[in-house]
Image: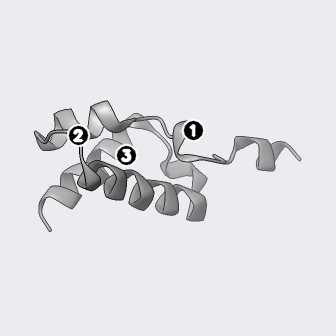
């Protein structure tokens, strides 16, 4: 039961938000911000330990290299 409570249930539970994504990538609000957040959420669903500001920031920076 405790493990279930630790897992994020929505994008809003991520340790970074759209504002962080825009700042890291230097982009304006738009579809790409949502795509990044969905990708991050999918990764965190697979491995809840990735839901840290540091880890997610690193993933966003990797997104920029695509």
User: In this image, 8 relative to 57: left or right?
Assistant: right
Numbered mark located on residue 13 in the image:
1
Whether residue 43 sits left or right of residue 46 in the image: it is left
Q: Which of marks 1 and 2 is in front?
A: 2
Q: Residue furthest right?
A: 1
- Horizontal and vertical percent for residue 17? 39, 35
Residue at image position (40%, 61%) is 39
At x 15%, y 44%, the residue is 25
Task: Give the spatial CA distance, label 3 vs label 1.
Answer: 12 Å
Q: Which mark is residue 31?
A: none
Q: Quadrant of residue 16?
A: top left
Residue 41 to residue 56: above or below = below
Position of 6 with respect to 28 (left or right) is: right
Give the distance between the C-alpha atoms of the residues marked 2 and 3, in whole angstroms: 18 Å
What label sits on residue 29 in the rendered view?
Answer: 2
Residue at image point 66% right, 48% down? 9
Which one is in front in this view, the residue at disc 3 or the one at disc 1? 1
Q: Position of residue 40 (x, y in %)?
A: 42, 55
Mark 1–mark 2 distance (CA, rounded to whole Å): 19 Å
* Residue 36 position in % (x across, y down): 32, 55
Q: Mark 3 points at which residue?
A: 56
2 vs 3, front mark = 2
Q: In this view, does 26 lie above or below 59?
A: above
Q: Residue at x 48, y 50 (%)?
A: 50
Q: Which of marks 3 and 1 is nearer the N terminus?
A: 1
| Mark 2 secondary-structure assignment | loop
Secondary element type, mark 3: helix
Residues marked 1 and 2 touching at CB (< 8 Å): no
């Amino acid at each position: 039961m405790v493990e279930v409570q630790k897992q994020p249930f929505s994008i809003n539970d991520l340790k970074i938000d759209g504002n962080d994504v825009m700042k890291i990538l230097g982009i304006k609000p738009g579809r790409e911000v949502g795509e990044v957040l969905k990708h991050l959420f999918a990764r965190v669903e697979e491995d809840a330990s990735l839901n840290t500001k540091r880890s997610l920031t690193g993933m966003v920076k990797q997104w920029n290299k695509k």
